[in-house]
Image (tube, grey):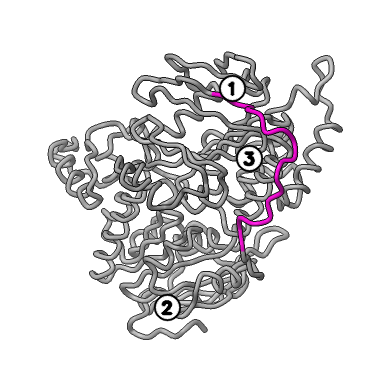
C-alpha cells in the first residue's frame, strides 16, 4: 500500500502496473500526492513517467493496482472523467489549436455565450486577458494562436488547464519551450495556486528546476519505483544516480580534439533577414563547436534556419571550405554537407508515422538507390549501424518513431544526419526534453563529430550546455551578434548581461 490515506493526501497510487504487448511499462508503482504540494516525477526516457501520467489522466487504464482520489477509489475510463474529478494534464505535445484565437484556446469548450449560443467575444477576451496577466505577458487574446512562437503556445496550453479549477495538475516538461523569464512567471503562478491547495505533478529533465519548485520528488527507473524524497534530503548527484543506476560525474568531459588543420569550414557574412536578424557574421572552424546563446526571440534559430536554406535571406554570403555557395533550400544544404537538427523534432524534424529505419535513411536516400530502385539491404545495414552506434532502444528498426521515448526520438534525429557525413551540423536545442543519460550520449556524439573535423553550430537556451560544450560563444540580442567570446572568458553572468544588452560592464 502507498504511504497511507491520511487527510493531507489527495491522490494515492497503489501498486500501479501497466502491461503492453511484450513490455511491462510500470511494475507495482506506489506513492502519494499531498494537497497543496509540488511533487516532481523524474526518470530517464522510457522510465514510465508518461505511461503513469496517461493512467492518472484517464487515457489508459492500469493493468493492476488502484487509484484513490480524495479517499475514494476511482476508475477513470477516459480523460473526461478524470477532468471532471479535478485532474488536468498539460502534455508536452501541445493540444492547442493554431486556427483558433488565443482566447478560444484558453477557454476551449467553456466560452461565454449568449441566448443564441453565440460567443460573447468581449467577455471572452477580457477573461483571457486576466489569465494571460498571471504570466506578465502582453499577448493579444484575439489573435490566432498559430501566429505565436512555440514558447507562447506553451503558456496558452498551461493557462487552458488552469481555467477548469483543477485540484491536481500534471505538467510534462512545461518549461521546455519557455524562456527564463517565462519559467519564473510559471513558477510564481504554481506557488500561488499551491497556496490555495492545488497540487502539481511536475515532470522535468531540467534538474535545477526540480530543486527550485518541488517539495518532494519521486524517481522511476525502468518502470519501477525507486523512492520518494523530500527535496531537502537529496542532492542532484544522488538523484541522477537513482534515475540512471550509475553516477555521472562530468557530463561534458572526455572530449577528443580534432587533430587536423583548424581552417575555417563555414563562414557567414552579412546575413540579414528583415524582422529576424541583421548583419550576422561568424566563422566556424574544423573541429570547433561554436555556441549561440541569447534570449528567446534573439534570432538564433532564425539564423540557423537561414544557413540551412529553410528561410530566405535579404542579403549575405556563405562560404564553405573557402568557396562561396548559394543555398536556397534544405536540399541544397544537404548536398553541400550541411545538416540541421531542429529544435522541434516532432513537427519539423522526424516523420513520426514512419519507421526508425526510414527516418535514419531520410536525408541520405540518394545514397541507397540505383537507377531509381531503393536498395533495401543497404538501408537496413546503414540503419542498423546507426541504431547500434547511437544506442537507439527499440525492439525493431521497423518500429514507428512516434512510439519511441523522447530521448530515443532525439537520438534518431541526430543519427539521421550521419548518412550525409556532415561537414557542418547545426544543432538547435539538441537535448530539449531528454533525460540526463540521453544527454550524456548526445554530447558524446556531437563531440565525436567535431573530433572528425565537422564544424558544429550549437544553439541552446541551456547556459550550462553552452558553457560545457562550446569552444567559442556568440551572444545574440535583437537579431544581432552582441559579442563573441572564448569559452575561457565566458561566464553565465556575462552571457546574460550581453543577452540583456548590458554586457559592456561585464566583459
Kindly indicate whether the residue at mark 3 contacts the one at mark 1 (C-beta within 8 angstroms): no
Q: Tell me what residue is drawn at x 40 percent, y 20 percent.
A: 273
- Residue 356, position as x, y percentages in the image: 70, 41
- Residue 21, position as x, y percentages in the image: 70, 58
Secondary element type, mark 1: helix
Q: Which mark is residue 357?
A: none
| 436 w.r.t. 459: above or below | below
Q: Is residue 447 left or right of residue 120?
A: right
Q: Tell me what residue is drawn at x 60 percent, y 66 percent.
A: 18
Q: Earlier in the sequence, mark 1 or mark 2?
A: 2
Where on the picture, by quarter, is residue 426? top right
Where on the picture, by quarter, is residue 26? bottom right
Residue underneath mark 2: 232
Quarter of the picture holding the C terminus = top left
Q: Which mark is residue 413?
A: 3
As measured in the structure, the alpha-carbon distance from the residue carrying label 1 to the one carrying label 2 is 49 Å
Dot 3 surroundings within 10 Å: few (below 14), some, or many (20 or more)?
Answer: many
| 121 w.r.t. 373: above or below | below
Amino acid at each position: 500500500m502507498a504511504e497511507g490515506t491520511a487527510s493531507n493526501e489527495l491522490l494515492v497510487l497503489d501498486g500501479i502496473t501497466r502491461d503492453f504487448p511484450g513490455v511491462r511499462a510500470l511494475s507495482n508503482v506506489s506513492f502519494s500526492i499531498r494537497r497543496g504540494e509540488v511533487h516532481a516525477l523524474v526518470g530517464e526516457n522510457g522510465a514510465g513517467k508518461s505511461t503513469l501520467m496517461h493512467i492518472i489522466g484517464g487515457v489508459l487504464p492500469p493493468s493492476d493496482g488502484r487509484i484513490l482520489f480524495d479517499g475514494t477509489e476511482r476508475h477513470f475510463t477516459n480523460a473526461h472523467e478524470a477532468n471532471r474529478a479535478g485532474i488536468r494534464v498539460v502534455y508536452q505535445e501541445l493540444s492547442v489549436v493554431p486556427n483558433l484565437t488565443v482566447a478560444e484556446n484558453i477557454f476551449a469548450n467553456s466560452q461565454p455565450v449568449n441566448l443564441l449560443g453565440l460567443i460573447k467575444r468581449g467577455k471572452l477576451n477580457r477573461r483571457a486577458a486576466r489569465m494571460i496577466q498571471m504570466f506578465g505577458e502582453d499577448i493579444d487574446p484575439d489573435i490566432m494562436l498559430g501566429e505565436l512562437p512555440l514558447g507562447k503556445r506553451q503558456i496558452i496550453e498551461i493557462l487552458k488547464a488552469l481555467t477548469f479549477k483543477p485540484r491536481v495538475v500534471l505538467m510534462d516538461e512545461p518549461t521546455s519551450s519557455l524562456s527564463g523569464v517565462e519559467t519564473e512567471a510559471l513558477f510564481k503562478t504554481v506557488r500561488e495556486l499551491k497556496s490555495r491547495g492545488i497540487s502539481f505533478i511536475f515532470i522535468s529533465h531540467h534538474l535545477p528546476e526540480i530543486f527550485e519548485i518541488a517539495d518532494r520528488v519521486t524517481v522511476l527507473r525502468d518502470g519501477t519505483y525507486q523512492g520518494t524524497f523530500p527535496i531537502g534530503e537529496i542532492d542532484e548527484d544522488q538523484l541522477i544516480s537513482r534515475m540512471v543506476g550509475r553516477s555521472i560525474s562530468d557530463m561534458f568531459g572526455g572530449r577528443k580534439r580534432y587533430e587536423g588543420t583548424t581552417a575555417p569550414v563555414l563562414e557567414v557574412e552579412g546575413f540579414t533577414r528583415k524582422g529576424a536578424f541583421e548583419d550576422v557574421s561568424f566563422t566556424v572552424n574544423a573541429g570547433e563547436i561554436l555556441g549561440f546563446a541569447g534570449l528567446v526571440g534573439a534570432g538564433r534559430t532564425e539564423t540557423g534556419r537561414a544557413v540551412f536554406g529553410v528561410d530566405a535571406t535579404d542579403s549575405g554570403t556563405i562560404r564553405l571550405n573557402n568557396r562561396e555557395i548559394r543555398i536556397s533550400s534544405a536540399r541544397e544544404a544537404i548536398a553541400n554537407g550541411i545538416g540541421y537538427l531542429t529544435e522541434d523534432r516532432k513537427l519539423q524534424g522526424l516523420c513520426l508515422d514512419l519507421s526508425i529505419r526510414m527516418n535514419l535513411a531520410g536525408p541520405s536516400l540518394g545514397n541507397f538507390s540505383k537507377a531509381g530502385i531503393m536498395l533495401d539491404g543497404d538501408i537496413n545495414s546503414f540503419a542498423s549501424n546507426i541504431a547500434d552506434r547511437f544506442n537507439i532502444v527499440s525492439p525493431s528498426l521497423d518500429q514507428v518513431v512516434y512510439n519511441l521515448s523522447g530521448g530515443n526520438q532525439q537520438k534518431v534525429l541526430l543519427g539521421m544526419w550521419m548518412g550525409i557525413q556532415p561537414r557542418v551540423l547545426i544543432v538547435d536545442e539538441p537535448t530539449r526534453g531528454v533525460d540526463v543519460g540521453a544527454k550524456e550520449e548526445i554530447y558524446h556524439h556531437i563531440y565525436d563529430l567535431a573530433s572528425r573535423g565537422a564544424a558544429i553550430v550549437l544553439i541552446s537556451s541551456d547556459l550550462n550546455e553552452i558553457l560545457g560544450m562550446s569552444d567559442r560563444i556568440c551572444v545574440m540580442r535583437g537579431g544581432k551578434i552582441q559579442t563573441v567570446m572564448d569559452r575561457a572568458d565566458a561566464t553565465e553572468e556575462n552571457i546574460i548581461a550581453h543577452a540583456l544588452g548590458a554586457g559592456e560592464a561585464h566583459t
